[in-house]
Image (cartoon, rainbow, N blue to C red):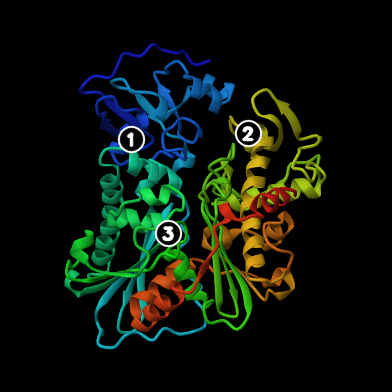
Amino acid sequence: MVKQTRLVPITKNTLVVFEPAGLRISAPQEATVLETARSGGLHIASECGGKGTCGSCKVILQPVPAPTRNDLQCLSKEEIAQGYRLACQHTPVNGMRVIIPQNIAEAKILTETKPSSRAIVPDSGLQGKIGFAIDIGTTTIVVYMMELGSGIQITQAAALNPQIAYGEDVMSRITYAMNKEDGLETLRDKVVGRVNRLISELCESQSVDHEDVVRYSFVGNTAMHHLFLGLEVANLGLSPYNPTISSPLKKRAHDVGLTANTEAEAYFAPNLAGFVGGDTVGFILSQELHKSDKVSLGIDVGTNGEIVVSKKGELFCCSAAAGSAFEGATIRDGMRGQKGAIEYISIESPEEPPKLTVIGDITPRGICGSAIVDIVVELRENELLDSTGRLTSGNRIEEHEDFGRLYVIAEERELGSNRRIVFTQKDVRQVQLAKAAIRAGIQILMQEAEIGVDDLRGIYLAGAFGNYIRPSSALKLGLLPPVDESMVIPVGNAAGDGAKRLLLSENERKAVKEFAERVRYVELANHDDFTETFTGAMSI
């Protein structure tokens, strides 16, 4: 049991040491540990935006303060005893050490694009000039350096979106921008600064003169678009969630804070709705869903899942609030896809340890999205989970005082470490909710398009989750309609590929402007059948 200390209130020159980075940060007056980390540019996960309800900002504090009510609700007794506390619930004292768990380190970021077979025809007169196609995701930012005359990608770079320190999901950031003094300016400065740094690093690495940079193109969901431009986001937090701006934009680089050739042109893809933005536009463009002669489904499964139906070029879209379960944020031992994350799981015998595939081939520290889907499917197939999502009984299933019933993925002795990895009953429920949100969105969109499963000729999965998930597991979970596995096609960072096309060609921009005006957006929350469809999709 870690000794708890009565802490002295924060003083003007309070210095806090954050490990394992060894970073010393002077705490602002009355700041929490989480806010202190943010002030020094250090990322600590905070899915709920610092409200003390999600438990994702857990750190070890030395000296250890007495636990708050939120600590006791979000952390297990073992974690409390080991000195874990919620960073958003405690103010630091001078000399405090804050140990950030390793699973908060930067994730494996998907930069690979898998474009359609259609070649891009670049605009003329741009030989030797450079452009940057930029995909601003809620979690990650990807920047592609392109030679505009040839359309060839020179190099790329990626990083976590620094806004993540202010909330893992879109709504947390909207709330921060609305409720905090200078909140919108803070979030804008963070993301613009990170994009400028990535661009400068790429220019330096390739010996590119800033004056040769003449174009930028941007895609991102509606909230990321608004926050980058410093636009009012209050409407995105209130029904009917209308964007401040929907149409495509062309701006002078200087006017949006870009520093590599401030006279360059910056193009921003249009938004389709409050929660369906330019990233979905890029996805549609990349896979040519706007001009297809087939019936297909496009899905980007993230915290805010975007779904598109193409009915021989007629387009329907919606947004499904899937939450962060598939990204590991609301899972007991969940983590992003990075070294030490269990990527795939298979259970060959209910009584034996499951077979694990771990990113980096090192001792596992947690479980990421693709394996989160695997474990639910494997538990169901081995009759350790019933159709309602209730864990049953078995050699590796046990009752826990804090978490109820749980399945032991790996014991301490199996890992050779001082902690084990488990999957709890609450984790199963989180997956059910996320799966039901996506599947209900798919069913309602197909209903509105008047198509059935037999009409589908392809299901395109975009983004990191779609790229790494096993199609067979997604089908068995019921996340996707029941089609032949060969019809499920991972397309990588399709939004990024769309951004490249929009960078290189005015014709591609004209195509986007045309189809963006005819996409039919379906608001799930207001749909008469949503509640019934969502409830029916909860079963496994």
> How far apart are the alpha carbons under marks 3 and 1?
26 Å
Rendered residue at 52%/61% (across/down):
463
**Disc with the residue nearer the chain's start (2 vs 3):** 3
Q: Amino acid at mark 3?
A: Asn
In the figure, 371 relative to 111: above or below?
Answer: above
Q: Residues within 10 Å of mark 1 (few under 14, many from 20)?
A: many
Q: Which residue is mark 3?
A: 221
Q: Residues within 10 Å of mark 2 (few under 14, many from 20)?
A: some
In the image, which is nearer the foreground, mark 3 or mark 1?
3
Q: Is residue 32 visible?
A: yes
Spot occupied by residue 335 in the image (x, y as percentages of width and height) = 53, 44
Q: Which residue is mark 2?
A: 420
Residue 531 or 455: which is nearer the viewer?
531
Q: Which residue is mark 1?
A: 37
Residue 345 or 73: which is nearer the viewer?
73
Q: Amino acid at mark 1?
A: Ala
